[in-house]
Structure formats: C-alpha cells, structure tokens
Image (cartoon, rainbow, N blue to C red):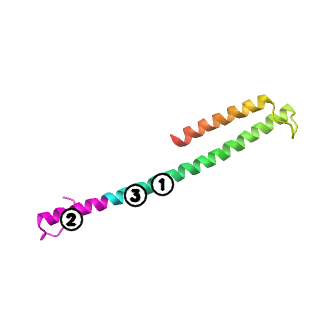
C-alpha cells in the first residue's frame, strides 16, 4: 500500500478518512498542475502563431513588392487585380501552412 499516513495506532475509520483527505489533496494538486501546463501550452502556441503570422506577412509583402516592381506599378498606384488575387492566394496558403505547423 503506497500511503504517506503510517501511524499504526489509528482506527480503520480514521485511517480511511486520512487516506481520503490525502487523495483529495493529491487530486487538487494534479488538477492545478494540469491547468498550469495547459496555460503554458496556450502561451507557447500563441507566441508561435504571432511569430508565424509576422514572418508570413513580411514574406508576402516582399513578394508583392517584387511583383509590383517587375510589372512596373508605381508607388501610389493601386494593385492590379492579378496582384490582389495573388496576395489573397498567398495569404490563404500562409494561414493553412501555419495551422498545420502549429495546431497539429
């Protein structure tokens, strides 16, 4: 029997009550430890998501800037529809890749 209550002068009822108190205390500690671990995991996922979003958006901005330069689009002109469609496609691919990387 693996218990921390080792007093042999206890009656069986008192010993059972003490063991129950110990089990309840151990369950509370385990529950708290689980909550702490879950909070740490959520924080890690959030940090990874934020970093991935920032890196992905920077990569998309570089790609769009290169395409605009190659197409000869001036600085203050709006993006042509082809660049807008490409940007939407790149953003969707980034989100899918990020979800696969982080959430799985």
Label 1: few (<14), some (14–19) or many (≥20) C-alpha neighbours in 10 Å: few
Which quarter shows the N terminus?
Answer: bottom left
Q: Quick check: is 8 in the magenta stretch?
A: yes
Q: Which residue is at a point 19% across and 63% down the rendered structure image? A: 17
The disc, 3 or 1, on the residue closer to the chain's N-terminal end is: 3
Q: Position of residue 8 (x, y in %)?
A: 13, 69
The disc, 3 or 2, on the residue closer to the chain's N-terminal end is: 2
Q: Mark 1 highlights which residue?
A: 39
On the rendered structure, is 102 left or right of 56? left
Q: Nearer the viewer, residue 29 or 17?
A: 17
Residue 63 is drawn in which quadrant?
top right
Q: Which residue is at a point 69% across and 43% down the rendered structure image? A: 57
View extreme (top): residue: 82
Q: Mark 3 highlights which residue?
A: 33
Q: Nearer the viewer, residue 58 or 81?
A: 81
Query: In terms of secondary structure, where does tag 3 sit?
Result: helix
Q: Which residue is at a point 77% across and 28% down the rendered structure image? A: 82
Q: Mark 3 and mark 2: span between their CA atoms? A: 23 Å
Q: Quick check: is 18 in the magenta stretch?
A: yes
Q: Position of residue 7 (x, y in %)?
A: 16, 70
User: Count of labels shown?
Assistant: 3
Q: Mark 3 and mark 1: span between their CA atoms? A: 10 Å
On the rendered structure, is 13 left or right of 26? left
Q: Which residue is at a point 39% across and 58% down the rendered structure image? A: 32
Q: Which mark is residue 62?
A: none
Q: Mark 2 highlights which residue?
A: 18
């Amino acid at each position: 029997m693996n218990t921390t209550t080792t007093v042999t002068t206890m009656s069986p009822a008192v010993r059972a009550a003490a063991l129950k108190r110990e089990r309840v205390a151990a369950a509370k500690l385990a529950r708290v430890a689980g909550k702490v671990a879950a909070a740490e995991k959520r924080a890690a996922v959030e940090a990874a998501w934020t970093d991935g979003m920032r890196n992905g958006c920077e990569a998309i901005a570089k790609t769009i800037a290169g395409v605009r330069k190659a197409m000869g689009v001036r600085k203050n002109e709006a993006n042509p529809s082809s660049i807008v469609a490409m940007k939407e496609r790149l953003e969707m691919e980034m989100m899918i890749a990020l979800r696969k990387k982080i959430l799985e």
